[in-house]
Image (cartoon, helix red, strand yellow):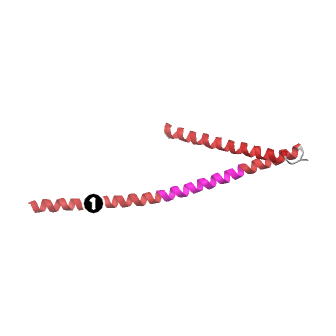
Amino acid sequence: MNASEEAARGLTDIERFLYRQAHLEAARRRVEDFTARAPGLTKQQRFDIERWYLAEQRRIARLVTEHIADSINVVEEQHRIRFGRWLRGTLTAMVLITAAMGLCVAVVLGTSS
């Protein structure tokens, strides 16, 4: 992996980390707002609810990320197949054109003699 690829991967990793942190911070605020509006909860109950909710948000974020990655992989594979077909077709056309040009040259040279 060259330096440019490493830098791009590093930026992607940083972006992913920042997105995840922002998502978790928003989830933390939502659950704190929720527990603050629920009178009668003990400190331990609030802690348990917050811990469960954040763990659930991490799990959901992981599932969504995996789904997106799987979708991207499917699209990339479809693109690879289409590109391969296009490339084979182009190569076949080039071979046929080259053969036709060779035949034309042979005919022209043959009629000149």
Q: 18 or 3, which lies in front?
A: 18
Extreme residue in the right direction? 40
Residue placed under numbered mark 1 in the picture: 97
Image x and y of residue 80, in percent: 47, 56
Q: Which residues are magenta?
A: 58-79
- What residue appears at the point 86 percent right and 48 percent down from the top-left corner? 38
Residue 59: in magenta span: yes
Q: Amino acid at mark 1?
A: Ile
Q: Would residue 50 appear left or right of 77 to someone viewing this image?
A: right
Which quadrant would residue 84 be assigned to in this image? bottom left
- What residue appears at the point 73 percent right and 50 percent down from the top-left corner? 57
SS of the residue at dot 1?
A: helix
Q: Is residue 113 above or below residue 31?
A: below
Image x and y of residue 10, in percent: 57, 39
Q: Would residue 40 appear left or right of 33 to someone viewing this image?
A: right
Q: Residues within 10 Å of mark 1 (few under 14, many from 20)?
A: few
Image x and y of residue 111, in percent: 11, 62
Residue 71: in magenta span: yes
Extreme residue in the front direction? 37
Q: 106 or 20, which lies in front?
A: 20
Image x and y of residue 17, in percent: 64, 41
Q: Main secondary structure of the magenta part?
A: helix
- What residue appears at the point 65 percent right and 43 percent down from the top-left corner? 19
Q: Is residue 44 above or below residue 72?
A: above
> In what quadrant of the picture does the C terminus appear?
bottom left
Report how many numbered discs are placed on residues in the image. Answer: 1
